[in-house]
Image (cartoon, rainbow, N blue to C red):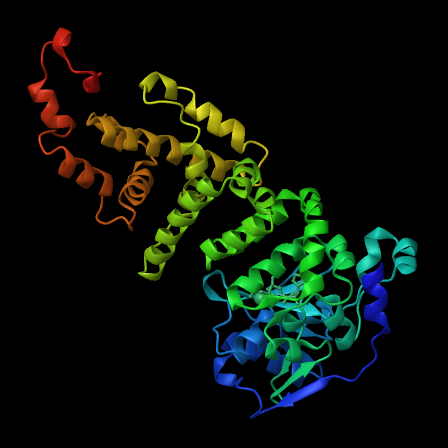
Amino acid sequence: MAGRNIIHAHTEKPRILKRPKHRISRRDIDPDALKIIYRLNSQGFVAYLTGGAVQNLMQGITPKDFDLVTDARPGQIKKRFRNAFIIGRRFRLAHIHFKEGKYIEVATFRREPDEKEEAALDPAHRYKMTYGTPREDAFRRDITINALYYDVGTESVIDYVGGLKDMASRKIRIMGDPGGRYTEDPVRILRVIRHSVRLGFEIEKKTEHAIQSHRNLLGEVAGARLFEELNKDLTLKTPLVFEAYQKYEVLKYVLGQAGEEYDRNPILFSRLKTLLEIRESAVSDGFQFSREEVFALVSWPWVESRIPDEKEDAYKNLNETITKAMAGSWLTKGLRADSIQILVLTHHLIQALRTGRMRWSLQHRSHYKQASRLCFLIEKGRPPQGKDPFASLFHSMYPATGTKRRRRRRRKPRSQASPDTR
Ligand code: ATP
Ligand code: MG
């Protein structure tokens, strides 16, 4: 592949940046990551901090995770750390676990096998052939600014790939031939867009051009992998990341059928963006959303546009419509079922606000609490407040309407009952 040839032809020495020419301090590095580095170093292994964490620290951003890379093989790591677990088949990595589900990923320097090597390998043993030097490891990564190493011992940033230059000019660049690298792994397209949005960096020209010609390859990526990416998108700057995804027309790959419509319908997309912005501001105020709530929120504008008219009968197949549209998407079965329940309930609550008629028995449904919050967020355009935001909103709009218990005492004879008590 074209990208590989360029990578392997590279023989230059790394550029080394020492303190005080960079601002990384040991104090900013996760203490557990530091412990792992010190232990590996004391046993004669090289161990660097790498990935997004190095460029984050250089820019004064708190990293999301601290990825390490070493010349110790996975088996050697496992022997030295009681809490290490080896994961991955082709590329074996160690996850070193700490309290409360926290773990640090420790990879071994590796390289991409060339095509001849790859063809000759027994698939079951491929990983054995892929270990490499630090330089080879840097070049098998994707974005230059995320392929830097930080050596704690010498307090130096090590750059084999031109990442420091790209950081200075605020550029997101794929190493080698972007088309070839996207073909090897189309998920890199999403990584390029996400990193450019998160850091406010421009996407380098060739890296950007190849997105258009290769984005259809995202259609072949396994759902589980896209789901993993989507979860990253939903943690930080979601409205802006989705806006960029829409610009590059890749929402359909991360959001399935709903995404396809968000890609081409600007009105629907702007509705989605507004909801995501409200959520973002709620999160920055310390509000927490469950995953199924977030997926329901992301689907809502699309669901809403499918509700045909205001007659109650028209909604009886809503559950079925949503289920069909979400079927085959990347969501896990349980998450999909929960999101659908929230969407259907949210729809009922919004209807209640429109008509003034509420079936209070819905309060006993298992997803009521989440639907109550979502309904408030959608209707009021601000983060939900209180235990039951929907009920407070409903009572403020219809002060005369009581709760289920009060209604029962006042119930009229059956023939005169109003429709909401059915
Ligand atoms: P984040 O800030 O989201 O953690 P990251 O770039 O560190 O961003 P990770 O998923 O933590 O992303 O991956 C760690 C490192 O592994 C990356 O920085 C990159 O060097 C390398 N990497 C990850 N995914 C790929 C990929 N698809 N192709 C090549 N290298 C990758
Ligand atoms: Mg990372």
Reply above or below: 73 against 101.
Answer: below
Q: Residue at 70% across / 77% down in the picture?
A: 162
Please provide percent x and percent y for residue 335.
48, 40
User: Residue furthest toward the left?
Assistant: 410
> Which quadrant would residue 109 be assigned to in this image?
bottom right
> Which quadrant would residue 117 be assigned to in this image?
bottom right
- Left or right: where does residue 311 sit relative to residue 416? right
Q: Quadrant of the C terminus?
A: top left
Please provide percent x and percent y for residue 181.
75, 59
Q: Residue at 40% across / 33% down in the picture?
A: 304
Q: Quadrant of the N terminus?
A: bottom right
Any part of residue 158 in sight: yes
Task: Give the image quadrant in which the ligand numbered 1 is located.
Answer: bottom right
Any part of residue 90 in sight: no
Q: Of 333 and 57, which appears nearest the observer?
A: 57
Q: Residue at 47% across / 44% down in the picture?
A: 269
Q: Of 375 and 150, which appears nearest the observer?
A: 375
Q: Of 25 and 311, which appears nearest the observer?
A: 311
Q: Of 128 and 237, which appears nearest the observer?
A: 237
User: Residue furthest toward the top?
Assistant: 415
Please provide percent x and percent y for residue 199.
53, 68
- Left or right: where does residue 353 sit relative to residue 77? left
Please provide percent x and percent y for residue 68.
63, 72
Q: Residue at 59% across / 74% down in the picture?
A: 170
